[in-house]
Image (cartoon, rainbow, N blue to C red):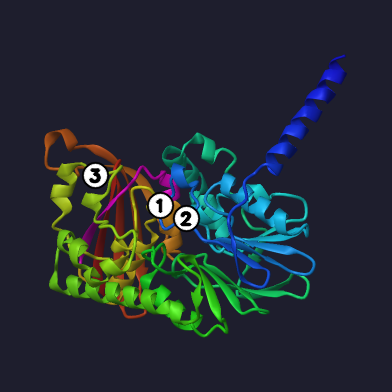
Amino acid sequence: MTHGVSVLALLVALGTSTLSQAQEQELPVSEVAPKIFVHAGETALMARENDGAIANIGFIVGDNAVAVIDTGGSVREGRRLLATIRARTDKPIRYVINTHGHPDHVFGNAAFVSDGTVFVGHRNLPRALAARGQFYIDAFRRIMGEQLLDGVRMIAPTLLVDGTIQLDLGSRILTLRAWPTAHSDNDLTVLDEQTRTLFAGDLVFLAHIPVLDGSIRGWLRVIDELSTLPAQRVIPGHGPVSEWPGALTDQRRYLETLASDVRKLVARGEPITVAAGTAAATERLRWKLVRGVAAHRCKGGIARKSHVRQLLNRRLVSDGYFDYSDLATSYPSMRGVFQGVVEWNLEGTLKDISLMIVNFQVPRDVLGAELERTLPDCNFKAGPKTHDLADDQEETGKPTTEWKCSVHSDEGRALNITFDLAPDLVIVEIESRAL
């Protein structure tokens, strides 16, 4: 009798699961080229109201198989994409290709886990997901709610791209290319050779303010090379499908303006408060989701006023400071900031400086991994330290973790770098000297 009840329960469970999949609402898509389908993400931040569906995602159908390019900002969105695919073809989904590791592109991966499906990504993607994955999940659970985050898993690719590879879907060749650090350090593009349609991921933004998690100068270099790809149209990570390479014009202008303005501000010794309101000001009306991101304006993890008061007069030291569209609701990656600090000092652009970065309760091991990714040649030494950070009695004696690093440049400069990790902020001290 017990066995019979168990079998009955199993059949009911299977039937419920099958019914749930069958009733999953399809995700609206457009056929932008023969057998290439795209869901246009909303130009917004990931939220409960939009299921995290803010990125462009899609799929390509070949004679023998299907490839999915990014899976969306929740398992629910991923399941809806799967329902859309199944409404159009019964061919097996052979590949799930992630263009990079940000939540709005990978949170739907779990919907596609099945026998025979291969997850594909940049060679750096597994490391990025391991370092940030749990933080992403915890952070967006607070923003989007338990129900939407239920089932989200960080699924690392098993087929890694280092350089260029080709995938055959059956009379349909896809060329995948891994890029150097630009928007992030794990950007991947997918070019359908048959229709010359390029899935660019977040290497290309249209309408949505470009968001940096890598190197602004690296991104500008990549744009030059990206523009030579033999594509007719591009599917950006955010924004409308557009003609190629004209789609790069606005983004290139924005990044060049931002870099130029920040360099001028640094040369004049302007404080962060001035820079936040003026860098790339001419671009602000051209983009959506533009927000000031100076540390003292951030929500949700703001440093104590005494800390801000003590540090706001520090010089602006990195273009990366201004390239996160919303630090309050996305992972506060330190990589672009650190990289800008180090690059500019190695060139001799800056003298000894200090920088405050708000730390949104980033786990120490995660932040340590970020530092090591930014400065792989450094030998970091961590240890506990008591450090007086503020000017009022109640704030003194806060425990911090101190990271130290030394690095030399080809231009004949040496940097001694100290990162003080306080409970709610990070202070970077750089001593720069000629060898």
Q: Tag 3 or tag 1, which sits nearer the N-term?
A: 1
Whether residue 362 is in magenta: the answer is yes
Residue 232 x, y percent position in the rendering: 56, 81
Distance CA(mark 1)–CA(mark 3): 23 Å
Query: Under tag 3, what secondary structure?
Result: loop
Q: Residue at x 20, y 70 (%)?
A: 351
Residue 435 visible to the viewer: no
Q: Residues within 10 Å of mark 2 (few under 14, many from 20)?
A: many
Residue tagged by mark 2? Answer: 54
Residue tagged by mark 3? Answer: 303
- Relative to 37, 402 lies left or right: left
Q: Which residues are magenta?
A: 352-367
Picture quadrant where residue 431 is located: bottom left
Residue sitting nearer the eye, 385 or 204 = 204
Q: Nearer the viewer, mark 2 or mark 3?
A: 2
Tags 2 and 1 touching, CB below 8 Å: yes
Q: Nearer the viewer, mark 1 or mark 3?
A: 1
Whether residue 353 is in magenta: the answer is yes
Residue 275 x, y percent position in the rendering: 19, 64
Seen as rendered, the residue at the extreme top is: 1
State whether residue 77 is above or below residue 41. above
State whether residue 177 is above or below residue 110. below
Residue tagged by mark 1? Answer: 45
Q: Amino acid at mark 1?
A: Leu
